[in-house]
Amino acid sequence: MRTTFHQELETIDEKLIGMTQLVQSAMGRATTALLEADDVTAREVISDDNTVDALRREIDEHILRVLATQQPVAGDLRTLVAGLRMDRDLERMGDLARHIAEIAAEDAPRDAVPIQLHGIVHSMNRVALHLAEQVKEAIAFRDRESAAELEREDDEMDTLHAALYKELLASALPMQTALDLALLGRYYERYADHAVAIAESVRFEAAASA
Amino acid sequence: MRTTFHQELETIDEKLIGMTQLVQSAMGRATTALLEADDVTAREVISDDNTVDALRREIDEHILRVLATQQPVAGDLRTLVAGLRMDRDLERMGDLARHIAEIAAEDAPRDAVPIQLHGIVHSMNRVALHLAEQVKEAIAFRDRESAAELEREDDEMDTLHAALYKELLASALPMQTALDLALLGRYYERYADHAVAIAESVRFEAAASA
């Protein structure tokens, strides 16, 4: 019985890691689409988001099934409930990558990001992808340490976001470009916030099993 | 045993409705602070958000306790899991009201919203407050009808949001004002999205008990 239960937990973890992989790939490709005004990639990211949403529903149902049939308590219960939070955060990370792809698709073949701001968007993407990588590790190893590191990295995202805002204020960009960039900055920042929320879920769970 | 369980569910519902009341009040006051450049009210909204966050933790723990001690299945299990989703959405609605108050506090005594855009912000606030009202009803009556109505009202918010964006493009506002307004529009829109997500949770639950 316990073995079956822990096999179920492992399968759920594998699905969560697979979902993280998908939203990491979506973010990387959305940024490429954005910086290279690549319409085809942008549309791919938009349609691939359905797979992320479907995976979330699958994980939800899986967790509910295990809750109903195995009736876990204490740490095991928290692990499952944490899974319900995590798949929600991952779904939002997918949505945010899709929003970035939508801006890329809308503006292509025009470049949505002026060349002088490519560097900062590249950096925001780099931090986002690295955060997603750490989310995978945090889930795989139920690791409180990497959860703390994730929060430090989120500070780097906030610094980049503030720098972007400052650039926008100082620039004489057309209004539409500036508004798009303000939203883009917000999407990268929120993606990072959700990664941190997942780290918090891992910690919530670790607190129970400590 | 069953009676105790249903008393627990009622208490959890009351807490969720209380939390909705708080985030509704927060949004109303944040908008007042914004449109009247009222620093004192803005700061109140910001500090009151701690109460919302604490209530969310309380509801989470309450639901986990009931899950562990009563080991519900089927519809009852879904009701509790839906509660975990709802308190998360409500917490975000509180955060978004706080973000609006933060813009008000930052800009006061300067008016963050130019007078010609007061009408549209008023309308977004009106829709937001009405959505929160419907969330209370949807939770209280576990009502699928009001859940559907809520989605229609969200369309009105999207229309207002698009109109605001168009106004910003057509205007010759200073960059900082325009960027603040773009974010403000997004905050009202996301507040409405979370209200709709709560309606979906009510429906998810109703689907199970149908």
Image (cartoon, coloured by chain):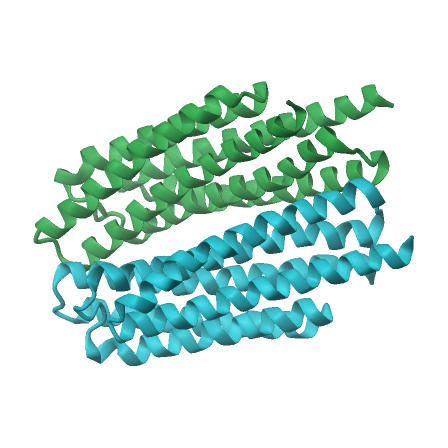
Chain colours: A cyan, B green
In the depicted view, which residue is nearer to us: A17 or B93? A17
| B176 relative position to B42: left or right | left
| A52 relative position to B153: left or right | right
**Residue A19 at x, y percent in the picture:** 57, 62
Residue drawn at (48%, 35%) of the image: B23
Residue drawn at (57%, 44%) of the image: B88
In the depicted view, which residue is nearer to us: B106 or B171? B171
Any part of residue A16 in sight: yes
| A117 relative position to A210: left or right | left
Q: In which quarter of the image is the C terminus of chain A?
A: bottom right
Residue drawn at (46%, 71%) of the image: A128
In the depicted view, which residue is nearer to us: A68 or B108? A68
| A41 relative position to B116: left or right | right
Residue farthest right in this picture: A1
In the depicted view, which residue is nearer to us: B46 or A70? A70
**Residue A11 at x, y percent in the picture:** 73, 60
The answer to whether residue B169 is above or below residue B7 is: below
**Residue A124 at x, y percent in the picture:** 39, 73
The answer to whether residue A16 is above or below residue B30 is: below
